[in-house]
Image: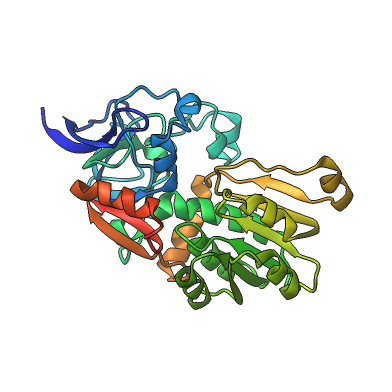
Amino acid sequence: MTTMRAVQVVGYHEDLRMTEVPVPEPAGPFDVVVKIGGAGVCRTDLHILEGQWAEKSQVVLPYTIGHENAGWVHAVGSAVTNVKEGDKVIVHPLITCGLCRACRSGDDVHCENNQFPGIDTNGGYAEYLRTSARSVVRIDDSLEPKDVAALADAGLTAYHAAAKAARRLTPRDRVVVIGAGGLGHIGIQVLRALTPAEIVVVDRNADAVKLALSIGADHAIVADGTQVDQVLDVTDGQGAEVVVDFVGENGSTAEGLAMTRRAGDYHVVGYGENVDVPTIDLVSTEKNVVGNLVGSYNDLQDLMALAARGAVTLHTQTYALDDFQSAIDDLNAGNVRGRAILVP
C-alpha cells in the first residue's frame, strides 16, 4: 500500500499534525483522485481547530483538512468521462449527488446528500485527494494549480457573493466591500468585472487598502473607527445600495448594516459573530440581510473564465506542505496578503 503525507486535525484546540496515511483510490465509478498542486489555507481552517464546526460537521477525528484544492487528475473511476489522468483541474469544494432537487436546478451547494472534503471528510492538506467527477473543472493551460487553488473556495465564495450583489447594481449605485484580504481582494476584482457600480473598500490594514485601489476599488478607506462616517460621506449620507461583508466579526456586522442604504442589501460572507439588529430597524428601513455560502459548480466555471482572461488574479504566499504551521500562524496573526497556499 502506498502512503502519503497528510496534515490532520487530531483534536480541537490542539495543533494540526503531519501523518502518513494511505493514498486514496477510486472507490466508486464516478470517483476522481487528484494529485494536489496547491491547497489554500482558509480562516475556516482556524475555526475548525477552535471546534466551531464540530457539531455541524459531525466529523470523526482524526481527519485531513483543506477545502481549496487544485492539481492534476491522478486516477479515475470506471464511469468518468469528463476528465482523464494528467488533466489540470480545480476542485469544487463539495461532492454532490446530481440527483436531488438542488443539484438538478444547478444549486448544487445545497445538495441534500453532499460531502465536504476538509470539513466532514478528508481534504487536501495532503499529496492526494479523492473527489468526484461532478466536482472537477478543467482549467486553462495558462493557469497553474498552486496559483488558482484558493479560487476553489475563497474565490468561489467571493464570486458567488459578488455576482449576487451585482444583479441589482446599476451605474448609479455604490457597493461597499468590507475586508480586502483573502476573499475580499477577489470580490473586488469580480465586482469590477461584473458591475459598473462605484466600489468602496474598507479595511483596517493600510497595505490591504493599497492593494484594493490597485485592483479596481474607486475609494478605499482605512478602518480607524470612523469608517461608517467616511462611507456615509462618500454615499451622500445615504449609505450604499449593497454592502458585502467579508469579515463578519469584530463589530463589522453592525458597521456593515449602518453603511447600508434604506432598502439596501447587506451581504454577510465572513463569519464569527452574531448579526444583532432590532426588528424595527429592519422593518422601517426594509434592509435585507443576505447569507452567502460557497458558489455552485457553474459559479466556479464562470470564475475560471474570468481567471483565464486575466480579469481575476489571486495574490498568494506559498508554503511547503511540511511548513503548514507557519501558514496557519501567519494567517492567524494577519500577516498574509491575499491567500496562503500549501504546495506538496
State left or right for residue 76 relative to residue 261.
left
As drawn, the residue found furthest toward the front would be 225
Q: Is residue 119 above or below residue 312?
A: above
Q: Which one is nearer the viewer's eye here, 303 or 173?
A: 173
> Please, which residue is most extreme toward the right here?
284
Q: How is the image coloured?
A: rainbow
Q: In the visual, does 329 lie left or right of 4?
A: right
Camera-side residue of 104 and 259: 259
- In percent of width and height, residue 231 lies at 70, 69
Q: Residue at x 67, y 59 (%)?
A: 243
**Place of residue 60 in the rendered image (x, y in percent of width and height, measured from the top left):** 36, 22
Q: Quadrant of residue 110?
A: top right
Q: Quadrant of the N terminus?
A: top left
Q: Position of residue 71 (x, y in %)?
A: 28, 50
Say if residue 298 shows up in the picture.
Answer: yes
Residue lying farthest to the left in this orientation: 1
Q: Nearer the viewer, residue 182 or 1?
A: 182
Q: Is residue 197 left or right of residue 112?
A: right
Image height of 85 relative to 307, above or below: above
Where does the image place residue 129, in percent across and percent down from the top left?
A: 28, 38
User: Number of labelled discs?
Assistant: 0
Image quadrant in which you'd find residue 3: top left
- Drawn side of residue 160 relative to residue 288, left or right: left
The residue shown at (33%, 48%) is 328
Q: Is residue 87 visible?
A: no
